[in-house]
Image (cartoon, coloured by chain):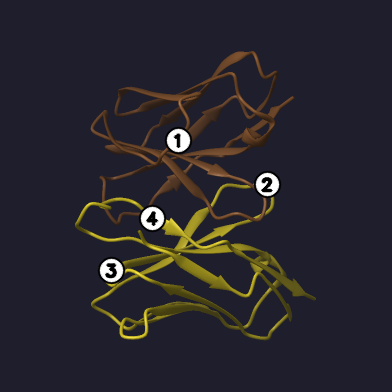
Chain colours: A brown, B yellow
């Protein structure tokens, strides 16, 4: 698959579990993003990475921990989540950190039980 | 920070009619305004964007207008078709400053086009 891929597509986890979401982009982009999409809310930016360096943390709780080992891969490590963290988590990438088109992945539908 | 308001939240039109979605923003430093379309169960995709040095941009049946003085921008879809049914998100961002690269999204508009 080309573009931006995300795995898994669906995830159900208990509040005490630890899991990770993975995002990979095949576009040669330098910036990657994590967004949270909840029903009837705007897309919420969580983290921004530019050239593997985290450039923004939008006051995200520490139970979400991002990792960007290189410009093509982005992870979101999850632990001790709350039911209100259930949402669609979207990864995106762009040419650089700026007003460039952001290419979104298909998302991971997360349910916390 | 930037605050983007989007209206209406839902919009139903008959096939062939026009649809207009409006957004306002608060930060005068914003100079990049993209629109994303998200079909049911799919990822958001950019459909058109406009930068603050132009007032209007068209691409076939869609157009976006920008009024920097009033801090609002609008998406216009003409000759709507059922496949235009989706959620549309507006966003605002800037080239420079502390929020470089960050897009602020509106809450979305669910557009339904009836055949």
Q: Which residue is mark 1?
A: A60
How far apart are the two marked residues, 1 and 4, measured between alpha carbons?
16 Å
Element assignment for label 2: loop
Quarter of the image holding residue B88? bottom right
Q: Are marks 3 and 1 in contact (CB under 8 Å)?
A: no
Q: Residue at x 65, y 14 (%)?
A: A16
Q: Nearer the viewer, mark 1 or mark 4?
A: 1
Labels 3 and 4 positioned on one and the same chain: yes
Q: Which residue is mark 2?
A: B41
Work out whether residue A32 or residue A56 is closer to the camera in this orientation and state it. Answer: A56
Position of residue B115 measured from the top left corner of the image (x, y, whole percent): 80, 76
Q: Which residue is mark 3?
A: B31
Q: Nearer the viewer, mark 1 or mark 2?
A: 1
Task: Residue B8: give its label.
Answer: none
- Is any part of residue A1 visible from this angle? no
Quarter of the image holding residue B111? bottom right
- What subunit carries mark 3? B
Residue neighbourhood size for the residue with mark 1, other residues' Cα within 10 Å, grouped as few (<14), some (14–19), many (≥20): few
Vertical arrangement, residue B44 with respect to residue B65, above or below: above
């Amino acid at each position: 698959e080309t573009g931006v891929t995300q795995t898994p597509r669906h995830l159900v986890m208990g509040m005490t579990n630890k899991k990770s979401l993975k995002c990979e982009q095949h576009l040669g982009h330098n910036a990657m993003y994590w967004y949270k999409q909840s029903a009837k809310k705007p897309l919420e930016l969580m983290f921004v990475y530019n050239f593997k360096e985290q450039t923004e943390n939008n006051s995200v709780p520490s139970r979400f921990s991002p990792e960007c080992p290189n410009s093509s891969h982005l992870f979101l490590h999850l632990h001790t989540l709350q039911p209100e963290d259930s949402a669609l988590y979207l990864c995106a990438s762009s040419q650089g950190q700026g007003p460039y088109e952001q290419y979104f992945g298909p998302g991971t539908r997360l349910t916390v039980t | 920070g930037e605050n983007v308001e989007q209206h209406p939240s839902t919009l139903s039109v008959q096939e062939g009619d026009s649809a207009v979605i409006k957004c306002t923003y608060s930060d005068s430093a914003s100079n990049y305004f993209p629109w994303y379309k998200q079909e049911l169960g799919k990822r958001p995709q950019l459909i058109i964007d406009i930068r603050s040095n132009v007032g209007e941009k068209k691409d076939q049946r869609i157009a976006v207008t920008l009024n920097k003085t009033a801090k609002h921008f609008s998406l216009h879809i003409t000759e709507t078709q059922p496949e235009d049914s989706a959620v549309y998100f507006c966003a605002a961002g800037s080239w420079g400053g502390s929020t470089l690269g960050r897009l602020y999204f509106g809450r979305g508009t669910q557009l339904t086009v009836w055949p």
